[in-house]
Amino acid sequence: MRIPCPHCGTRESQEFVYRGDAAPVRPADDGAMFDYVYLRDNVAGVMREHWYHAQGCRQWIVVTRDTRSHAIDHAEFAR
Amino acid sequence: MSRLPTGGLVDRNQPLRFSFDGKSYQGFQGDTLASALLANDVTLVGRSFKYHRPRGILTAGSEEPNALVTLRSGARAEPNTRATTIELYDGLTASSQNRWPSLGFDLMAVNGLFSPLFVAGFYYKTFMWPAAFWEKLYEPIIRRAAGLGALSMLPDPDSYDADHGFCDLLVVGAGPAGLAAALTAARAGKRVFLVDEDSRMGGRLLAELHEIDGDDGRRWVDRTIAELAACPRVTLLPRTVLFGAYDGGVYGAVERVSDHLPTPLPGQPRQRLWKIVATRAILATGAIERPLVFAGNDVPGVMTSSAVQAYVRRWSVLPGKQVVFFTTCDSGWKAVHDLLRAGVIPAAIIEARAHVAPDVKALAGAVPSFLGAQIIGTRGGKRLKGVDLRDAQGRTWRLDADVLAMAGGWNPAVGLGCNLGARPRWSDELNAFLLDHPPAGMAMAGAAAGQFGLGAALASGIAAAAEFGTMAAPRTSDDPADGRPLWHVPHRRGKAFVDYQHDVTDSDVALAAREGFTSVEHMKRYTTLGMATDQGKMGQVNGNALLAQATGKTMAEAGTILSRPPYLPVAIGTLAGHHRDEHFRPVRQTAGHGWAAEQGAVFTDAGQWKRAQWFPKAGERDWLESVCREVNAVRTGVGICDVSTLGKIDVHGPDAGALLDRLYINTFSTLPVGKARYGVMLREDGFVMDDGTTSRLADDHFFVTTTTVNAAKVMQHIDYARQVLWPELDVQATSVTEQWATYAIAGPQSRALLAALLPELDLSNEALPYMGALSFRWLGVSARLFRLSFSGELAYELSVPASHGDRLIRALFELGRAFDAVPYGTEALGVMRIEKGHAAGNELNGQTTAADLGMGRMMSTKKDFIGRVMAQRPALTDAARPVLVGLKPVDPAARLRGGAHLLPKGADAIAANDQGHVTSVAYSPTLGHWIGLALLAKGASRHGERIIVHDPVRGADVEVEVCHPVFVDLEGVRVRG
Amino acid sequence: MADLVQMIERAGLSLATVMARKGADYGAIIAALGDGELHATGPGTWLAVSDASLDELPDRLRGQASVSDQSGGYIVYRFAGPGARRLLQRGAFIDLDPEAFGPGAVAVTAIAHMGVILWQVDAAPTYDVAIFRSHAESFRHWVEGMIPALAPISA
């Protein structure tokens, strides 16, 4: 699978480390921390995911990818 | 000899000698092993998998299911190699497989007598009882009888290479459609890769007689290849199998660099693995001819029609003297025509269709033909002797024949297009499975797209490359491509094979249907049809048709299975490439590695790193003696240990301290410049992730260390925190693990040794107290000195740039002679940290909290940090949790072992009584007995209690006393000296 | 085989990782390096390479960027010769064709599972490859195994 790193250009997925769903946001409210750590949607379709370009520019990026077909729409820096 | 006097693409000026099953033969340059064997009248080449039936060469291509031989001998022997694709070279040796004692007289053929028992699914139904017999009796017998070829079991002496390709257009298959597509794109100046599994490009044009642009079709091939070869943007890869299509336009291919030579030339690989990234791909992979399913369709001499055509036209070999054709489509008649033009007169044509177009009939000249007829059986065991047929009027005839050429129709080779999940669809119009919707960026062309006629194939190749450019289509007379499939000839006796390689017959498919395995996917697994090395290339569609008939479905309803990579078998060595033996993965060596190797150090692996484990001295009995000596030397004198492998990260910027406060459980923003502090990082779920010592070198510069194995993980974690969680902070981080060579210098004499090395530095306790950090210069380069101790002795860590690390270690030991300085390795390092109760990898196992390890009070209550909330969960703060304790054996001679479990005295050894486990053990030379660290339920309140260490796997139970985890210098006096 | 590829260590180099701080003037950062090389390895991140010392760089960039000395951490090899591009293409899964990668281009990627920073020096083409010092032996072994396979064989 090839991932379009916004800095380095399209690279083989082996250069990256996959983390997971980019949607959860670290909560300010302690009560929401359990869901943030453990609960995830199991999406069959387009998802925004966190990937780290470990063997490249060392940037965290958000990749919009369809989990059924692996088709990647685009990727941007995770800022 | 069955070689025709003239013609073919073999070079008669280059005779080659080869041997098969120990007998010597001659062939020519350009022969395959199969064509050369046929030229020498060798028609029996193997025994089938299950029934050990005599088998001959069925095809002329990589779809060959029968002619599997072991090529070469010794360490380079390659089992299950298809004779049809082995390029003949001088001195080639090959042997048949799956027979004993010989191919001609195979005792295992007795299986054929028991064939009613060996039907599909027989493994599931027999060998079930008694259950105990499976492991001891049935499985070993089956294992010995199973399989085809055998491995040499010797190390592979060849090397394997890799390469990467990038192109605008990848064309798979260099037949007419592929050549046309490649030429179209090449003329438009595009980067083109043209890949073909054969040694010569040209596909069907090498075997079939065609006219293109008024000349022999082969001339068009030569001209086209010459023009492509002259294009600098074109890469031609013959002898290359495109084995898989992967996501993102990535394709895998294997180039057979040296397989056509007796041995690879010096320095050359045997094969090369290609990863190709293509913006567009065109699959011009052609079509594979179907066998026909009738009784006795596997006797040596039964071949596909296109194979007979290829052996005659390309290799100038006549596979037999009496050639009969059994055909259901026009291409069979064309094959007859090509044979006539080569001077070979077939004996008869048995055509299943009742009517054939006049221009098709004309192709066969005066060869007698039966229309509306079927072959109902064959005669002959090791060699075809004759065929039986039933004509349109129902009369039976018997013909002499030693070759039966089957023209059963064509299956477009769409396999690669299915790798990404696209499913082929049955076309009633073309009687073929077509891939209408290949994956994005991929197109089909030529016969692979159902364009069976030559003119249509050329045009479709040009059209497939239309987005790049166009060219005029070459002129050719379109060959007729009509046909009607005959899926099955019913019979009462004999066997009709569907999958030749796994010996699956028509009755096996019918049995599968009767037993409820009515989907093509179930039929495949139940009968093993399509599961051999040919992945169903010859048998799948026939099997699907029989299943459809048996279940009352149409072909479209029955569907077909998806092909998976690799399209053809790929050697594991090719996938491994350079990465084998000691180069399986890269090795990381510290700056001090060379010196340590000179001292005879024994090395161990820590991730990719090599670390000195201990330094044996002459006369030492074993590792324990060496390690004890090293520990004693450190605790009484001075020892030096290479600790360069620990992760090191520079964290810079105005908000560096603020970031570290959010990552560590304790506070770092308050750390004064020139000081170091031990810190623990949690995961967000509250469990300990890593620990290390972090020093402040400037207001805006922290130097973070991690454990060796977690260096990358912590770097990733820090980057996540500063880029994703808190991007508003102005903080930068970079790995400097490689930049610094670091040595621990430990022991009562450590200060004196350092003073000798660094006379200009003030190393007094006041100038550099415990947990202090100092930057200075050594021989013109940056250097740092940290007063840190993992051993519990007075100790330092000295760092210089790794380019000077070798120089430093030698300087240390040169001066160290005066102090009897001793190198120590990871074992001694480990003994001493266990003596001091320091948690390390065994304790930081991802399941322990800071409180479990006795560091609960380090957790700040005044700031947020990663893991803060979840660390407070009831289960993580439960007083009954196992916590870190020390263990010492009641009997001082007893040995403790890591991993052993802890039970109260007198309790039964059952899981319900399990109170924890031993995490680390060491023989302590300082104390004179074994010690251990363990996680024990409510351990903090049980010091002094006696419990049992239970290790049923390795030895007897040991009674121990629970104690404080710090065994040596509990007050920590020595580090502060 | 030396005529196909020359691999020479650029000895005595100074290297540093430079990471821009918030609100930094990238122009000022680049100017601070003077005659040295600055290779962009990420957004606001550069590998500074110089034959001269880079000791002054942290002071020159104070407040603009964070600087970490990497002079001990990397070995830089220069690859030249008619086989240089083909050799590096065999190792790196990035497109080194002149259409895609030219003088001045830089890529952080991997060769044979070892992280590298690779840049093209000139149109010959000549390339520099920075590898971790600890990988030196593994990397050299990969190069030595690969070079003989570059020679064309008669089919």
Image (spheres, coloured by chain):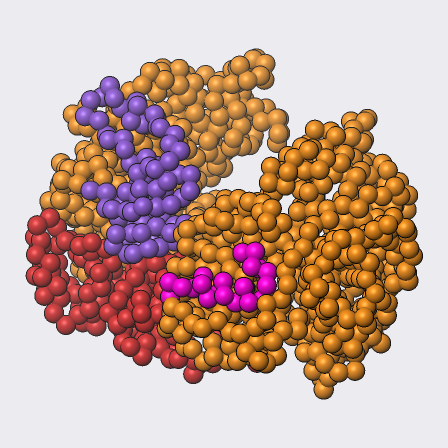
Q: Residue B452 in magenta?
A: yes
- Residue nearer the viewer, B863 or B742: B863
| Chain coloured red in this rendering | C
Shade of chain B as shown in the rendered figure: orange
Q: Residue B732 in magenta?
A: no
Which residues, given as a range, are shown in magenta? Answer: B447-468
Give the percent coordinates (x, y) of residue C5.
41, 78
Shade of chain A as shown in the rendered figure: purple
Residue B56 drawn above or below residue C81: above
- Residue nearer the viewer, B862 or B801: B862
- Residue nearer the viewer, B240 or B555: B555
Q: How many marks?
A: 0
In the displayed structure, does residue B334 sit left or right of residue B674? right
In the displayed structure, does residue B35 sit left or right of residue B708? right
Residue B263 drawn above or below residue C3: above
Give me the residue at 18% from left, 48% from top: B732
User: Majority secondary structure of the magenta segment?
Assistant: helix
Give me the residue at 91% from left, 62% from top: B400
Q: Is residue B805 visible?
A: no
Give me the residue at 48% from left, 28% from top: B918
Give me the residue at 81% from left, 68% from top: B367
